[in-house]
Image (cartoon, rainbow, N blue to C red):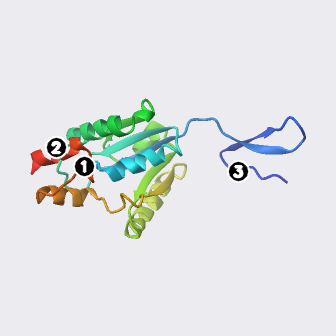
């Protein structure tokens, strides 16, 4: 008996009667949500790696967040768009930047996304992210969450730490783009 994995369709080989799974050709849309206050090189790393598992990606900038943001929604959107153009030109037309209000799952349903991408910096992130993915699954079990662990070179970068370094007039070039460095300097 052949068990067909979900998301795959069966196709016949020409040479014999054996069957083999063939990847479904439907486009896979993923959403990478966050406040991006500000976007960091760690975020860029996750975005690039997410593009290896999806066809199109929406970077969804949250307007409704319990976090107090340094940058306005418009400023965060502009910074993300600028960094995507700088660091991800190979994905032009496949990555969109959009702000959203309300529940992430409502936004994902509206956009017809099938995947939520979440980056993990450390084991300490996992517990919160796991809870969040379980809640999202209860809201819509058809939308899957995938976790992309941060690369070793970026796993220590957090937007909150970047803002603290900026406030104390430290060097930022190894954490964020030149454009974001300039924007942070204007705030502090």
Mark-to-mark CA distance, 2 and 1: 9 Å
Tag 1 residue: 38
Q: What residue is shown at x 45% (from left), y 37% (from top)?
A: 111
Q: What residue is shown at x 35% (from left), y 53% (from top)?
A: 42
Label 2 neighbour load within 10 Å: few <14, some 14-19, many 20+: some
Describe residue 112's horizontal placement relative to residue 100 as left or right: right
Tag 3 residue: 5
| CB within 8 Å, label 2 to label 1 | yes
> Is residue 132 shown above or below 50?
below
> Is residue 15 shown above or below 3?
above
> Quadrant location of residue 20?
top right
Residue 56, label in figure = none
Residue 183, label in figure = 2
Mark-to-mark CA distance, 3 and 2: 47 Å
Q: Nearer the viewer, residue 47 or 99?
A: 47
Disc 3 secondary structure class: loop
Label 3 neighbour load within 10 Å: few <14, some 14-19, many 20+: few
> Quadrant location of residue 101?
top left
For residue 104, say whether it is visible: no
Label 1 neighbour load within 10 Å: few <14, some 14-19, many 20+: many
Describe residue 159's horizontal placement relative to residue 188 as left or right: right
Mark-to-mark CA distance, 1 and 3: 40 Å
- Which is more foreground, mark 1 or mark 3? 1
């Amino acid at each position: 008996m052949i068990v067909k994995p979900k998301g795959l369709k069966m196709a016949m080989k020409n040479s014999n009667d054996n069957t083999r799974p063939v990847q479904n050709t439907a486009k896979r849309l993923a959403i990478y949500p966050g406040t991006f206050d500000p976007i960091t090189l760690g975020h860029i790393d996750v975005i690039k790696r997410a593009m290896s598992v999806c066809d199109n990606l929406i970077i969804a900038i949250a307007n409704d967040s319990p976090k107090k943001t340094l940058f306005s929604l418009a400023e965060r959107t502009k910074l993300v768009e600028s960094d995507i153009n700088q660091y991800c030109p190979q994905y032009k037309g496949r990555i969109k930047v959009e702000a959203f209000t309300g529940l992430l799952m409502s936004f994902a349903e509206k956009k017809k996304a099938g995947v939520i991408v979440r980056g993990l910096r450390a084991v300490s992130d996992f517990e919160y992210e796991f809870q969040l993915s379980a809640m999202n699954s209860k809201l819509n079990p058809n939308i899957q969450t995938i976790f992309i662990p941060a690369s070793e070179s970026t796993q220590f970068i957090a937007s909150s730490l970047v803002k603290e370094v900026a406030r104390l007039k430290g060097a930022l070039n190894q954490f964020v783009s030149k454009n974001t460095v300039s924007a942070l300097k204007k705030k502090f």
